[in-house]
Amino acid sequence: MQVLRTPEERFAGLDGYDFAPRYRVVVADDGTPLRFHFVDEGPRQAPPVLLLHGNPTWSYLHRHMVRGLVERGHRVVALDLMGMGRSDKPADPEFYTLARHLDWMSQWLLGEDLREVTLYGQDWGGSTGLLLATRHPDRFARLIASNTGLPVGEGVPPFLQAWLELTQSVPELDIGGLVSGGTTRSLTAAEQRAYWAPFPDAAFQVCVKRFPLLIPLQPDNPGVPLTRAAWRVLETWTKPFLTVFGDRDPVTKGAHVKFQQLVPGARGQAHAILPEANHFIQEDAPRELVDIIDAFTRVPSAAGATQARSSG
């Protein structure tokens, strides 16, 4: 299998992003080695806060949150999903499946031996992150779902239908423009260039264009069994579960309600809707997210179990 790797010089001198790169190799089911990139900052002995991005972004999206959380004494790990950021990019679109993303991330999680994790997942980082957490529940202490969802084949809403048609109809996506279009504030030219950095040309965008097809919206989508299995775990999840959504996000509007209604650990938590925050909430409200995550890490991991029992 052909695997593309973005040249390192593409990531030199990026605005606000000077973290030391870290790498771990996982093995694809055909035996191909694939390299994950991630940021790992802060005290190694502290329980990790895992930040997972969505499409078409990478760990650059979390730059302000990494610094803010490290200043609060946290160890912060920000992964680049396979096919994005500084991680490797398999060139065959058919090779990308939700099951394979879960397998690659599981190998990485176990290889890094992360435990007592507080997960913050936005967009695909939320969807894949929740699959990861429900596959390895003993390694996660708390979960935060942010501008994300976990569909189980309920159908394709008009907004996502338009997104599917757009991504599959053009040879190359305007990465900087897409991210800027999903924020309330205006990104600078340097910030937009940073979002372009992983993609020297259209050949590097295979994962970005494939991800929309993996959203388990259609009843026969191959990802539906995975998300149904995750929901079975979430419906018994008593550890703390928080939703933090932006009130300007048209992509996941209303998805927080299902989490709050069905996840026992969501009861009694300080759920938030952040005003003026769009889909890429990390760009619009990084300080607020740092405050929220920092406070949430102080919620005892047994609190959800207590709440679930007391609710009868």
Image (spheres, grey):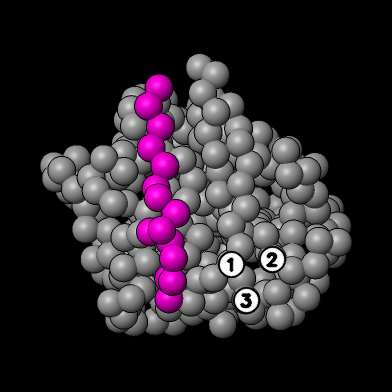
Q: Can residue 133 be seen in this view?
A: yes
Q: What residue type is labelled 2?
A: Glu
| Quarter assignment of residue 111 | top right
49 sits left or right of 51 in the view: right
Highlighted magenta segment, given as a residue range: 1-15
Confirm whether the magenta stretch covers residue 7: yes
Of badges 2 and 1, the one in the foreground is: 1
State the residue lying farthest toward the top.
Answer: 30
Q: Is mark 3 on a helix, strand or loop?
A: helix
Confirm whether the magenta stretch covers residue 166: no
* Residue for badge 1: 19
Residue in view at x 73 percent, y 44 percent: 112
> Above or below — where is 155 with respect to 75?
above
Percent across and percent down for residue 144 are 62, 60
**Which numbered disc flags the more N-terminal residue, 3 or 1?**
1
Secondary structure that dominates the magenta span: loop
The residue nearer to you, when weighing 210 against 157, is 210
How crowded pointer 1 is (Cα within 10 Å; few <14, some 14-19, many 20+) is rated as: some
Percent across and percent down for residue 188 are 31, 80
Residue in view at x 81 percent, y 61 percent: 44
* Residue for badge 2: 41
* Residue for badge 3: 67
